[in-house]
Amino acid sequence: MVRKAIISSLLCYALLAQQQQVTDPILKAMQAEMARSKTLQLMGLQPYFIEYSAEDQEQTVVSATLGGITNARQVRNRMPFVTVRVGSYEMDQTNQIYSNIYSGSRYDNDFLPLDENIDLMRQNFWLATDRAYKSAVESMSAKQQILKSINVTEKLLPDNQPMPGVVKIVPGARNKVDFDAWKARTSKLSAVFGDYPQVLASAAEFEALSSISYHLNTEGTMMRNPDYLTTMRIRAVGQAADGSVVRDAAAFLSFEDTKMAPEAAMQAAAKQVGENIKALVDAPVGESYSGPVLFEPMAAAQLFGQMLGDNLRNPRRPLSEPGRNVPFQPSELDGKVGSRILPDWFDVTDDPTLATHQGHALMGHYLIDTEAVPPKAVKLVEKGVLKEFLRTRQPIKGFTGSTGHARLAGNFGHRSAAIANLFVTASAQTKPLADLKKELIEMCKQRSKPYGILVRKMDYPSTASVGELQAMFQSMAQSGSTTRPVAPLTLVYRVYTDGREELIRNVRLKNVSTRSLRDILSATTEVAMYDYVNNNAPFALMGIPGYLASTTVAAPGVLFDELEIDRIRDDTAKPPVVPPPALR
């Protein structure tokens, strides 16, 4: 039966390949080795699915601080990726804690040759296939041992599902970046912070990824697709007199560097970051609070991006031996399909097929996901009720078929789903932001509270270091928080009953989860379009290498009936002993 599946897939691949004349050397190397891979045989296990992919990429990076270039490089490389699955679609070596383990030696290279030497490319794909196949066989043996040691009380879901083959060769080349121009612009942007002595550390960071992506698999898929992503990150850190760290950032995204925001807009954003640090250093420390909280549209888009983005995918718990601790975190929405997770006047849709919306270029647009599946629009929440999850090729309970949202690296042999263009829409209970602020004030008066809370910006994606995030998670656990951490607040204000706003610092959300979304009272008529780069790091931590998924979230501002705000009481470092040297 396995042999039939292999032969059928390879015949399908061959027929589709004949319809498309292949001249690209990388695809030709892939085709040649794919044809040979059907001969693999070890311990009675043949591959039922093989996928080759590659990225022919040029990366341009420029970093600067206070007007000085600290890093400038352009790197060209070709990275191959090979996936081999043994067994069958019903059960293969994945979805268990030993997925893709390999105890043998490695001989394949991390990179393909940059010249058009097809024989050398085939050599690397051959070695990579051999290693991936042996790893799959070894992992399959481990999975069979696990199944012998546990009591399986219900039928296991399939580990993979077949998808129709897609043949699409998109013309195009890598985008050429004006290296010198971006060095000059990045240097100039970073120099802005020389006017802000309150800023202890700052940087402007430009990165352009220009790539040609390749996919070939035994189901008949063969794709070549240009892929671009350009980012400019501007970030700054300050320290208050009590030693507390304050931070702010701005980011600009585009697919191509020629379509980035004008330099004047970036300069204005950098100056605003400097002004925010200056204000935060002198701002009073907030106090613990429970009551109404208003998120302006941009902050609401950040909140939805994290809370829904982390939970609208529903990974499966991997198999493991009895009593073994498994590093696995399920979705907060697991088991909630058909339940209300938002007010009944909210809908949520994710649509990667859209390239623009109301004149805004959508950063979540793409033609194919990392599993070579074309994406489709998904109505996730309808009238407040959860209807679906974003899905990869891994089946989940109650659903079949991928939605084409495999965008990030996953665990236990599978890719991870991620949002693309997430539209959060409110059909009722909407008011202009100014009126929602008045409603916040009125609620405070009714409850005899001296002030309410307004959130204007969150630290999402976060600019913190990995060490700072680890300390933050530990601190939140010690504070008694019962939910997974929510991104820190950057700009948060007390709104007094006379309408006055006061910036505060050193506060964070406490015990906020997807359950809290049901307590939204009203939404703004204004909608923010928030672009960011998603990854597998906590709070989408900026600058983490690996799979990157550019994303757009469109959402209105929202007023919550009651949320908890907790004062941060962490130990802090002393400020510098002497003032900084003069820069000018």
Image (tube, rainbow, N blue to C red):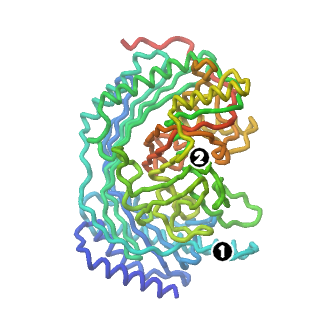
Q: CA distance from mark 1 to mark 2?
A: 29 Å
Which quadrant of the structure image shows residue 231? Answer: top left
Q: Tell me, yes or no, whether the two marked residues, 1 and 2, touch with CB atoms within 8 Å.
A: no
For marks 1 and 2, the one nearer the N-term is: 1
State whether residue 526 is above or below residue 364.
Answer: above
Q: Which residue is mark 1?
A: 156
Which quadrant of the structure image shows residue 273? Answer: top left
Q: Which residue is mark 2?
A: 307
- Mark 1: secondary structure: loop
Q: Which mark is residue 191?
A: none
Residue 562: x, y in percent? 69, 36
Q: Choose between 110 and 360: the one closer to the eye.
A: 360
Q: Choose between 40 and 460: the one closer to the eye.
A: 460
Residue occupying image coordinates x 28% and y 71%: 28
In the picture provided, is 392 more to the left or to the right than 227?
A: right
| Label 2, residues with CA under 10 Å away: few <14, some 14-19, many ≥20 | many
Which amino acid is tagged 1?
Leu
Residue 56: x, y in percent? 32, 57
Residue 561: x, y in percent? 67, 37
Q: Is residue 328 visible?
A: no
Q: Choose between 86 and 358: the one closer to the eye.
A: 358
Residue occupying image coordinates x 68% and y 74%: 145
Q: Nearer the viewer, mark 1 or mark 2?
A: 2
